[in-house]
Image (cartoon, grey):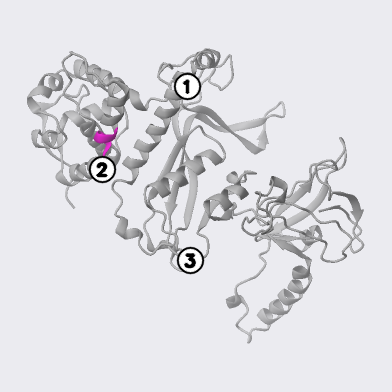
């Protein structure tokens, strides 16, 4: 395999660091970066947005940099695992050969003066970046330095309506440009055979470690990158001397919600795992808006390979952080069937009913095991077990111990399965053909559950695909007071 960096030449060093001579990127690395430049059309996109923003050009002498050169140098940093900073991008740009500079629209003679003077060249490069990419800056009024959160919020409140509209447009264009760069190197032929199934998840990018005084509220300092936020993760089991939860991880971060296309159900790994749509936003446990943006660009980028006709809806898999109350309607509107992925330790989920009066004792509700809702008395039977064990565990009938396990498992299923109340199915809308109006929120996808042992419990109008949470007598007409289970004697909420 050819080396990524070749032709070391200490005599041409322009870097200010010791033992870091100038180098030439190999053709393999540069050609891959050039593929990203040409596939994303970044130069054309930024150029058209700049012309809309500033139709006339000033009389100052133009700097020799180009958008294609910047994207190529940034791609080289990513491919080689180098820091993605402005200074490092300028160093990579300085290491391009005359032939490589020509391919990205730069001339060697016009770049020579800045190449040998590092400080002057880096300052000019920063100025050029601020000028050219102002069309995709979602908050040009915010300085890139730490300051009090109250000052930042005051500056945002002082914006006019036109300035807010311009910032929103710049944010949309930044998302479009980011997605164009991400999907540029994807070979679309490798995704053939997929059925439109997706996996979505978020990743955190740390911009600064936690220091004293850093925070999200007035009186605290925000990070230099105003677009981020401070995220702190608390321990569930460790507390300090005052009884407060210990913070195990914190920092000023961004979050990237990314969508990946996967193969059909019988060949999940038949397609490569690549990002086909992304959204950048503030960190959270699971951003609904970020998911919506990432999936929308997945479809805009041409990767929606769902089957037409009477085919099943494509699946979208997400983790427990995306349990938003809007998810059910989102699935219906976008034509996806959600599959929730829980942590390995989550063998069941217990629903706690909300009392109708302050101070009322919380009552047990339905238990979800493997996507099926059960009567709460099933908790004593599950104990972390799976609903169905692999048959290979019991197929050796010659072993009397395994045969006894089969009998015990069969007996357990006879007690376990009759307690099923309903299935956590995909979202759907129940409406009548003669009703031309759109169903209201409380009419969308009702699921009726009742006690499988004694039909004494009231039913619930909770939407399918979500956890039913009664809000009280005034908002939930079907809510009934708690009753005592005639089988177990336990006080159970009627859902």
Secondary structure mainly formed by the magenta segment:
helix
Callout 1: helix, strand or loop? Answer: helix
Please state if 127 lies on the left or on the right of 387 as rendered: left
Q: Which residue is mark 3?
A: 309
Question: Is 480 located above or below residue 243 in the figure?
Answer: below
Other residues around mark 1 within 10 Å, as few (<14) / some (14–19) / many (≥20): some
Callout 2: helix, strand or loop? Answer: helix
Mark nearest the camera among 2 and 1 is 1
Is any atom of residue 287 visible in this view? no
Q: Quadrant of residue 142?
A: top left
Other residues around mark 2 within 10 Å, as few (<14) / some (14–19) / many (≥20): many
Which residue is more in the foreground, 365 or 6?
365
Q: Which residue is mark 1?
A: 164
Other residues around mark 3 within 10 Å, as few (<14) / some (14–19) / many (≥20): few
Mark nearest the camera among 3 and 2 is 3
For the point 31% across and 51% down, the residue is 186
């Amino acid at each position: 395999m050819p080396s990524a960096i070749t032709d070391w030449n200490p005599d041409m060093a322009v870097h200010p660091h010791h033992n870091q001579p100038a180098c030439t990127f190999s053709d393999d690395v540069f050609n891959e970066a050039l593929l990203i430049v040409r596939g994303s059309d970044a130069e054309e996109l930024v150029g058209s947005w700049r012309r809309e923003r500033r139709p006339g050009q000033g009389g100052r002498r133009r700097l020799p940099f180009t958008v294609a050169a910047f994207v190529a140098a940034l791609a080289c940093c990513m491919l080689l695992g180098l820091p993605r900073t402005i200074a490092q991008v300028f160093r990579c740009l300085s290491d391009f050969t005359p032939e490589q500079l020509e391919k990205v629209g730069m001339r060697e003679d016009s770049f020579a003066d800045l190449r040998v003077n590092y400080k002057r060249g880096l300052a000019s490069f920063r100025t050029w970046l601020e000028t050219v990419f102002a069309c995709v800056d979602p908050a040009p009024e915010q300085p890139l330095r730490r300051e009090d959160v109250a000052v930042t919020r005051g500056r945002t409140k002082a914006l006019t309506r036109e300035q807010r509209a311009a910032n929103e447009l710049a944010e949309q264009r930044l998302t479009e440009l980011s997605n164009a760069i991400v999907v540029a190197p994807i070979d679309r032929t490798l995704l053939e055979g997929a059925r439109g199934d997706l996996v979505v998840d978020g990743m955190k990018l740390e911009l600064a470690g936690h220091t004293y005084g850093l925070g999200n509220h007035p009186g605290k300092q925000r990070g230099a990158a105003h677009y981020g936020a401070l995220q702190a993760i608390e321990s569930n089991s460790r507390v300090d001397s005052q009884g407060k939860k210990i913070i195990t991880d914190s920092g000023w971060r961004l979050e990237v919600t990314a969508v990946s296309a996967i193969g059909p159900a019988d060949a999940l790994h038949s397609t490569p795992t690549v990002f086909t749509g992304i959204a950048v936003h503030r960190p959270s446990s699971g951003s609904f808006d970020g998911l919506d943006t990432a999936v929308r660009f997945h479809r805009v980028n041409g990767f929606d390979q769902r089957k037409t006709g009477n085919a099943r809806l494509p699946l979208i898999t997400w983790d427990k952080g995306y349990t938003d109350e809007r998810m059910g309607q989102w699935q219906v509107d976008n034509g996806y069937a959600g599959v929730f992925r829980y942590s390995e330790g989550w063998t069941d989920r217990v629903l706690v009913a909300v009392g109708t009066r302050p101070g009322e004792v919380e009552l047990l509700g339905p238990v979800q095991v493997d996507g099926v809702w059960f009567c709460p008395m099933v908790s004593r039977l599950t104990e972390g077990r799976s609903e169905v064990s692999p048959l290979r565990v019991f197929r050796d009938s010659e072993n009397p111990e395994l045969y006894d396990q089969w009998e015990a498992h069969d007996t357990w299923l006879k007690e376990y399965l009759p307690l099923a109340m309903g299935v956590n199915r995909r979202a759907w809308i129940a409406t009548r053909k003669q009703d031309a109006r759109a169903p209201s929120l409380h009419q969308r996808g009702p699921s009726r559950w009742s006690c499988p042992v004694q039909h004494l419990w009231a039913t619930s109008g909770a939407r399918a695909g979500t956890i039913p949470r009664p809000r009280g007598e005034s908002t939930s007409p079907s809510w009934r007071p708690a009753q005592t289970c005639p089988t177990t004697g336990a006080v159970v909420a009627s859902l």
